[in-house]
Image (cartoon, coloured by chain):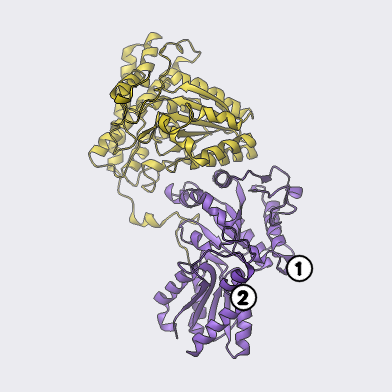
Amino acid sequence: MAELTYRDAVARGIAQEMRRDERVVMIGEDVAGAGGVFKTTVGLLDEFGPKRVIDTPISEQAILGAAMGAAMTGLRPVAEIMFSDFFAVCWDIVVNEIAKTRYMTNGQITIPLVIKTGNGGGLRFGAQHSQAIENWAMAVPGLKVVTPSTPRDVVGLMAAAVRSDDPVLFFEHKGLYSMKGEVPDGEIIDELGTAVVRRAGTDATILSLGLTVGRALDAAGQLAERGIQAEVIDVRSLVPLDTRTILGSLAKTGRLFTVEENPRLLGWGAEIASIAAEECFWDLDGPIQRITTPHIPLPSADSLEDLVLPSADVVATAVEKALQS
Amino acid sequence: MRLPLSEHGYGTHQVVLPPSDQTRHDNDEIPLQKRLDLYRSLQEMRQFEKRAYDLFMRQLVKGTSHLSLGMEAISAGFGAAMRADDLTFATYRGHAHTLARGVPMTPVLAELLGRSNGLMAGKGGSMHLTSVEHGVLGSYAIIGAHLTIANGAAWSAQYRGSGQVTVCFFGDGTTNIGAFHEALNYAAVYKLPVVFVCENNLYMEYTSIADITAVAHPAADRAAAYGLQSQIIDGNDADEVYGTATAAIERARRGEGPSLVEALTYRHGGHSRADPGKYRPSAEVEAWKQYDPIPVYRGRLLRLGVDEADLDVIDKEVAAAVDLATQEAIAGDLPDPASAFTDLWADGGSSWRN
């Protein structure tokens, strides 16, 4: 068991899979010589050499096109899009090509591809480097969508993503890169589409993802002091979605809260709230509540960014108020 | 030839015609059987697409379709020059490129008709023809995207040491989108075994490419800036295309990197099913019909001593094959409704939750 940072866990997860399978290759801007702008690919070039770890031009369409073409023809690439905001630059390749090709070709072409990216806010980068866009990806048929919240999960879910025969968008949270956590020795392999109960409780279910997992846990700690036992679920994977764990928890607690970084309109919490309302309405003891950022781009100043990202205090207050009403 | 403004819908522009000497490849060292195969290939593409057009008119082909009548020599020439395991990336105007790799007519026609015996069992349609078995890794309907994907297939071949070459077809309009430029630089940087083939038919959809492009040769004039070897050829002469394709593919196979071919050609019809192509001056259309690849090639074969009757036999055999493919395609069942929900994911299904 070793303590690793979240960013080191990314490199460890990729290296684990590159050792196992020489079809796994890594490409992206600054991923080789520099070890990644977020230092998430440190050591890969040294261990696997320039044939397998490749620095690219700043050409997001070319990067993802190359990754797709290689994945169609026998490789299992891991491609990096530095900041998830930049997906907008290459969204055609992601949505029209990578996501649709298997279906359009009636299963003739399979695309075992991982696109990793730094997602989310909290680092004062401003509106074009801070967005949480996992909900964009979730809306597209053909993309799997994963967001780990701990170093251990980074390794296990990265391994699952690389071994998946489907394209996976792997959203690393920029705000978690320096977070440390215990990671067991040896090979770790997780399963996509599995949510994890991070804290058990009986009074309310709080769904969280990436950065908001820690905030939901802090909120649950505050709530416990006030006599409310909240169950905190780390959703981990939006597609496939572990509705069994989520709705099972709701059946137990009767109250559902989602905590997400997405702007208010059409975040992932909206979809889960809709599923819960359709399928578990009679389990609900009160309205479902979504805790989100407001419907704005993220501001840069620390005082403003902190104001709009869901904090533990905001979550605790919202849950307490709802349960008392 | 230069047309005055009054004869052209969008202003004057240089109409690029191939050199008028249609005999210059008569003495190329190409085996006669290869030439007869090329002729058959041209006939297959021509007669297949004419049939596809007829089926549109009968409302049997739905949606849209983009024909390459008049442009067949490019597909035929490259198809003849490619190794069986080489890879093709085509555009939405991809019927001929697909047939050029040996994909049978029946599943292609059935796909246009939306039948279960179609190449993709009705999930792709005219614009997305794919046959992995024949190295046809798809036809792509978003301008420019597939150049970057072709790079990836070439990278994979290079990594695996398979010796495969990727041939990527695209139109002149593609050269004004960013992905074209990203893809060319990327291919050159990594010396990928890819041949980019611009089918310059002079019109970007409904607009003359010359009217909206700053350089005369939209692909070739820019390729050099990215370090690619490029050449401009008569895309209506199957022998010229075949010779050029052979050299470019062998160059890529030797590890000497990507190259670009700008093949000048002309579509006889409009951009797509809905377009009669009336924005083109009639003098221009007539001038280019002098360079219709089929009479050009037939003339060469006759000069080389082939019996006209032997060519007529090929024409009739192709016609019979198109008739048979039409019957088989129309006889195909409609797709099983359940198939709409299969093959999103590699497990064969489309489930997004447990």
Pointers 2 and 1 in contact (CB under 8 A)?
no
Query: On the picture, is B98 further left or further right than B54?
Result: right
Which amino acid does the dot numbered 1 rest on? Glu
Query: On the picture, is A45 further left or further right than B277?
Result: right
Camera-side residue of A228 and A158: A228
SS class, disc 2:
helix
SS class, disc 1:
strand
- Distance from the alpha carbon under mark 2 to that under mark 1: 21 Å
What residue is shown with label 2?
Answer: A215
Which amino acid does the dot numbered 2 rest on? Arg
Is A291 placed above or below B320 here? Answer: below
Is B151 placed above or below A106 here? Answer: above
Chain of the residue under label 1? A
Q: How many marks?
A: 2
What residue is shown with label 1?
Answer: A3
Judge the density around disc 1: few (<14), some (14-19), many (≥20) Cα neighbours within 10 Å.
some
Q: Residue drawn at (58%, 73%), measured in percent from left and top? A: A307
Tell which circle, 2 or 1, labels the residue nearer the N-terminal end. 1
Tell me where residue B346 appears, x and y as whole percent.
50, 54
Q: Residue drawn at (42%, 48%), measured in percent from left and top? A: A104
**Quarter where residue B12 is shown:** top left
Q: Which chain is purple?
A: A
* Res. B189 in view: yes
Camera-side residue of B268 and B168: B268
Tell me where residue A125 appears, x and y as whole percent.
63, 61
* Res. B134 in view: no
Q: Which chain is yellow?
A: B
Q: Which mark is residue A153?
A: none
